[in-house]
Amino acid sequence: MNVIGLTTQLHSKIVIVALLILCPTTGCAERCGSDRLDGSKRVWSLNSETGEIAGVIPGMALATLRDVGFPFEGHTVIIEGDEYAEQVMFLDHATTLRLLANEEGKVYRVSTDSPYVKDERGMGVNSSVDDLSRNYPSGKLVFLHEGGRQVKFFNGSNVVFVFDASALENQCFGEDRGMCNLPESYGVSTVEVFGFRLPSPE
């Protein structure tokens, strides 16, 4: 499964086929918790080394998701003609996780568009390129166009910070990227987490 191509296709070619399962929420707060509150919202910790968010870890079997204690819905998704299982887990009313499974029935990738999931340095959805570069000086912002335009920040961990490529002008994806002007409010739109470290593409 190609990481770069897969993350593009998930945003554009997901077809929901069937609703499979809903599990109870008993014990969620006691066993999974969060580090702190942001106003009235929970802030869920993302471990960038293991990929864990609220007890969900890439590589875990889908059959064990009930043990995490949060409700979830299961779907089949179609990606490039192939079927994959995906679960949408509801941590609370403000935060959901999308769990994509591989052929072995294990969580391959976790993603979220919630601003209430943060890594150890407080980075997550809505973080700016400057925020990421300041916290991860050796990280790299990458502009990709193979398989569709993508903008991603890699910091050498299990986490990839994804930006909305549609908000940028054409020159950002050409050979002369020195003319690329990022919008002032340009921030992370999605956080993707894998069970392995991701080096930045060349």
Image: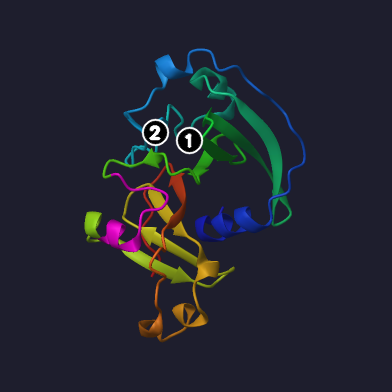
Q: Up-down: is 95 above or below 55?
A: below
Q: Characterize the local packing of mark 1: few (<14), some (14-19) or many (20 or more) Cα atoms within 10 angstroms.
A: many
Which residue bears the numbered disc 1?
59
What's the residue at 38%, 60% (across, down)? Answer: 153
Which corner quadrant of the image does residue 7 belong to?
A: bottom right
Could you tell me if the residues under marks 2 and 1 are in contact, i.e. CB atoms within 8 Å? no
User: Which image quadrant: the C terminus?
Assistant: bottom left
- Report the front residue among 196 and 8: 8
Callout 2: SS:
strand
Q: Up-down: is 86 above or below 136?
A: above
**Location of residue 44 in the rendering, given as x and y in whole percent from the top left corner:** 39, 33
Measure the alpha-carbon separation of dots 2 and 1.
19 Å
Dot placed on the residue nearer the N-terminal end, 2 or 1: 2
* Residue range of the region highlighted in magenta in the rendering: 122-133
What's the residue at 36%, 58% (across, down)? Answer: 154
The answer to whether residue 165 is left or right of residue 37 is right
Q: Label 2 sits on what residue type?
A: Trp
- Report the front residue among 146 and 53: 53
What's the residue at 40%, 66% (across, down)? Answer: 201
Which residue bears the numbered disc 2?
44
Residue 97 tag number: none
Can residue 202 be found in the magenta stretch?
Answer: no
Q: From the image, state whether disc 2 or disc 1 is nearer to you.
A: 2
**Location of residue 55 in the rendering, given as x and y in whole percent from the top left corner:** 43, 26
**Location of residue 61 in the rendering, given as x and y in whole percent from the top left corner:** 54, 29
Q: Label 1 sits on what residue type?
A: Gly
Q: Characterize the local packing of mark 2: few (<14), some (14-19) or many (20 or more) Cα atoms within 10 angstroms.
A: many
